[in-house]
Image (cartoon, coloured by chain):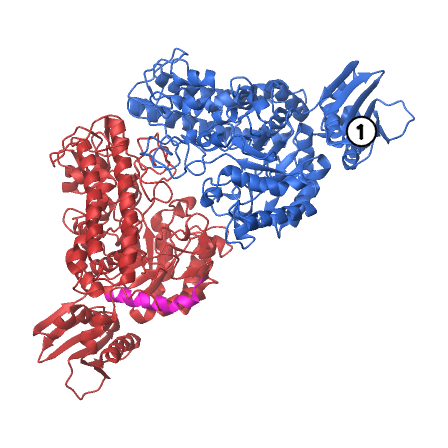
Chain colours: A blue, B red
Amino acid sequence: MQGVDPAWLPDEVFRPIGTRRTLIRGSGPLVDTVHGEVAGACDRFGGRVERDASPGPFDLVLELTGADASEGFTFERGDGCTTVTATGQSGLLYGLFHVVRLGEDAFRKQRPRETHGPALALRMLDHWDNVAVHPVMGQVERGYAGGSLFWQDGRARGELLGRVRAYGRLLAACGINAVAVNNVNVHATEAHLLTDRLGEVADIAGALRPYGVRTHLSVTFAAPIVLGGLSTADPLDDDVRGWWAEASARVYEAIPDFGGYVVKADSEGQPGPFAYGRSHADGANMLAAALEPHGGTVHWRAFVYNHRQDWRDRTTDRARAAHDHFVPLDGEFADNAVLQVKHGPMDFQVREPVSPLIGAMPRTRLAVELQATQEYTGQQRHVCWLGPMWSEVLRFRADGECSVGEVARGGLVAVSNVGDDPFWTGHPLAQANLYTFGRLAWQPHADPHQILDEWILLTFGTGPAAGLRAVLDGSWRTYEKYTAPLGVGWMVQPGHHYGPSVDGYEYSPWGTYHFADRDGIGVDRSAATGSGFAGQYAKPWAEMYESPDTCPDELLLFFHHMSYGHMLHSGKTVIQHIYDTHFEGVEEVEAARDVWASLVDLVDRARHARVAERFEEQLRSAREWRDQVNSYFLRKSGVPDAHGRRIY
Amino acid sequence: MQGVDPAWLPDEVFRPIGTRRTLIRGSGPLVDTVHGEVAGACDRFGGRVERDASPGPFDLVLELTGADASEGFTFERGDGCTTVTATGQSGLLYGLFHVVRLGEDAFRKQRPRETHGPALALRMLDHWDNVAVHPVMGQVERGYAGGSLFWQDGRARGELLGRVRAYGRLLAACGINAVAVNNVNVHATEAHLLTDRLGEVADIAGALRPYGVRTHLSVTFAAPIVLGGLSTADPLDDDVRGWWAEASARVYEAIPDFGGYVVKADSEGQPGPFAYGRSHADGANMLAAALEPHGGTVHWRAFVYNHRQDWRDRTTDRARAAHDHFVPLDGEFADNAVLQVKHGPMDFQVREPVSPLIGAMPRTRLAVELQATQEYTGQQRHVCWLGPMWSEVLRFRADGECSVGEVARGGLVAVSNVGDDPFWTGHPLAQANLYTFGRLAWQPHADPHQILDEWILLTFGTGPAAGLRAVLDGSWRTYEKYTAPLGVGWMVQPGHHYGPSVDGYEYSPWGTYHFADRDGIGVDRSAATGSGFAGQYAKPWAEMYESPDTCPDELLLFFHHMSYGHMLHSGKTVIQHIYDTHFEGVEEVEAARDVWASLVDLVDRARHARVAERFEEQLRSAREWRDQVNSYFLRKSGVPDAHGRRIY
């Protein structure tokens, strides 16, 4: 553990507790964890902790008052004592970290009793980690933080179990309670985690359990064939159902609190129920039935689309796919089957509308999937704090009434951005995304800027806080500015997805086009003249997106093909907007780099150096984006920049 | 060896010899090879072979009359006997294969004595084979014929030495006499072939030796550091020179007829003399000195350019690089140092002008490098017979007077297209490129179409000959038509180089741009207004390329940036030429596929099926090229097709 960044739990944040007298009441493994945390803090700072003892007085009482599975807790301050109670052990743990976050404030003035609890029961990270190094995707698919925390060269990393436990601790401190430990693309080696290599999963589960984090597994739909030797994986076949029931029972023998399965089926080449003429509800429900006796859940991903599309075919629109596939199945999924939907209709671009599927399945438990790993947002070489984007998504009134945060009854999931990097996330400031995700999953309507402040104060203290705010606050919009304009997306290098290539996906089979020609750019997704995708939305949105007059600027090219001369609501033409944002984006990166440089004496050396080094790459890359995108559109449109700046 | 395609040496071609009486006179290992070939033929067809015996009469006498290293031979027919004489053993072997090629004609009418011999002393294949699988480039860099003939997973393939011998036999039968057995990009594992893993090279040399093929090795310029533990590889350092001298002496102990070294230095990241402030002549001459006592040669590649160019920088022109770097060194290279120059100034595009370097170094031994492996010409999934292209290059009057074939005193080299594929070259018809290369290296001014006929008759017999001619003859121009127009090049997918991506290299660091905008396309390389590259040519060419009025259509966009409306000599505009050639190219592939299908009863089944399968891919790919390129330019230019055909 030496040399690993403490992230948002440096020793210092335990000082307010560690200098005081604490009483812990109750028993159980997570209460032991709470005790261990407080005892450790007292060791460091000279305070005192008692268990189930009466001779007071105490500054802090942490009391388990029940034996349920609740994650909530109460908090109050009166008579010189701060009291946290919980009816479930995890609740007590979350209560402890609430006190940690409050710091000295937890012990200052009177506070009436407050009740806290997560808005969403499942707050999960999906690790796209491969067990065996994939020839193309490597150890971690879309991983930008070194190797995997869990796996290396085909085996579980026993030597890292201590770090896995520390990871669980960080997750608990921001409210995350579930981790899927392998990639949704389940290759040959990974398939075996379900059966003969289950012991490796159990070891990881054991390291995460003390912090209330349950372990989930990505499984292949073809498991009955590839592992069970059956001739079919047909979800309605009795042998197949029996095989899954037995396999699941064995999983629960090894891991009694196992969370469940994550499944990517009929998606980008993965096997699924379509091969047997069955629906995705049939597929998901079969796995749900196998998990149900044990209290497990299947997370069934809705990322189903034609990834072998002919770019010449303008009648097919990938954005429509999830809605087209899944809305007809609303009401057919079992109670413990969760449909896991990416937040946007495409794939984690820097700007997408919210997926219309999210508001269109009222009788289905949905989980919403975000991407903390910055595949399309700078790959942890660029600062890009995603809090504002996620918050916009979660507050979006999906069905016209309820917000995404309310509709996501199946939970909030993020693709993890963590690896074996000493800073956990490669770019030290990318830790903010992980923290923000956890806190938003706990409370989807929280103000992301307050969460950012919380993260900054825990991680860096007050000294450099203003600078960090300046660097992070607008970083997502900055990234958007110097990359893909007006919701158009996909102007990235194919394959690895880092850096610009305006036409990189334009003639590909992936269904990701911008249709730029000498006159204009964008995808007509209107109901009247386009693919009809806009019509998949609930009432106010369908109308708003249908017309360029009412469509928000930032999504205009996602929904409409517009001429370069079209005047935006902002008062700029499309082409001038492209030029201006790309120049501005680079200037903002330069400014952020300078702010960071000014923090040199306020941030520890290694962390400062790592971020400074990444800023150089971000700036180089941002300039590359600016110049490629501007040159591309100048060459294509022939319209000069109104301000006469250099375009190549 | 079972199941391996006989290529141009099927048993049948030995029938004319194998049914007759042959006398072989002389001794030595290659005479034994000759004897073995004739004896094998007689075993199969009932003829008779004697060695150094007198009782005649004989139909064929093969006689070694000297003991020199000559590769020439005489051929005559009189008094019912055909006689081949040679003063060197390889000459006798080449004479035998001459008789094989003539078939029954060798034994028909009287023929006065003819003298044959190679125009070029060195006729070489460079294998870009890696010993250890390279993480990006695989076992064979730019290999499209399965794995390596020589190496697998880090070791020499002992089990394939029989196939290596058969490879040597095919090479001798078309006149090739040298093979470099490893990639010019010498990675860590491959470096050791020079020293502690020399035994593996010796084994390969032993398998090739019976057919007069000498073995060469690609070495890293940094060998004294990475293998010898020295602190420098400075070519003027005495320790470095001593290290190379000793290493070379040990090579010759193990392989007495070792050919020499191939070196890619200061090129695409490989180490070289620039690091020590030395010239490339210094570098090459140091290695030449080490090889000189043993009769070896260093092949020093001229492929030196800035591969980290900024695409924004229009003052740098990669096409100029080899001439700029090497012309000042003319006269400074040692006698046994050969400067190996790619035939074009860029990198094996389907159409390039001849490199101006070739005519500009009269006091240097130059070898000209071609690419048989079809990196940019369809990767052995497309039929693309390169004979006409190579012939045009070899007949080009490099310095205004002498042809490239005459100037290439250091030999002709091709990057091999052979792997462990049962058909040797993946696409069975790609064998024609290997054969044509060998024959053109022997006689650079030969008519490639006659060579093609020769190859067809040897390989397929007369039955399908007309069909094969129809399929192969124009296949290079067909490929050019549906890919990159008018010499512009580089419209390929970056990295693997298969399939179209018009802007794939447009904003890259590789120095390979087309500068297409809404008005026009092409690179101004004139002396008057462009990069000056045209001025690097000798007199007639410099003037011809300088002006769009005199520049040949097929190279127009290589030398000039032209508007889409510019009228070509052909009477078409640039844009209409692009559209027309792309439609024609696909039609020609369709026609060739149909011709091939009609040969089903005239070609053996496995070979027919393999080619038929590849034609489907070629057609799919050609349509993709057509549609992407035409769509790109329609979107950019806005000019509709004059014939109203479908462009997307």
Q: Judge the density around disc 1: few (<14), some (14-19), many (≥20) Cα neighbours within 10 Å.
A: many
Which of these two is toward me, A587 or A214?
A214
Which of these two is toward me, A531 or A2?
A531
Assign the C terminus of chain A to one quadrant of the image: top left
| Helix, strand or loop: magenta stretch | helix
Q: Which residue is mark 1?
A: A64
- Check the residue under mark 1 and report the chain it is in: A
Q: As drawn, which residue projects farthest toward the right?
A: A55
Residue A597 visible (yes or no): no
Q: Which residues are magenta?
A: B156-173
Image coords of residue A61 (percent x, y): 83, 24
Q: As drawn, which residue projects farthest toward the top?
A: A571
| Residue A343 higher or lower than B250, as above or below | above
| Residue A345 higher or lower than B342, as above or below | above
Asked if residue B578 lies left or right of residue B238, the reply is left
- Which residue appears at 36% of the width and 17% of the height? A574
Q: Quadrant of residue B433?
A: bottom left
Assign the N terminus of chain A to one quadrant of the image: top right
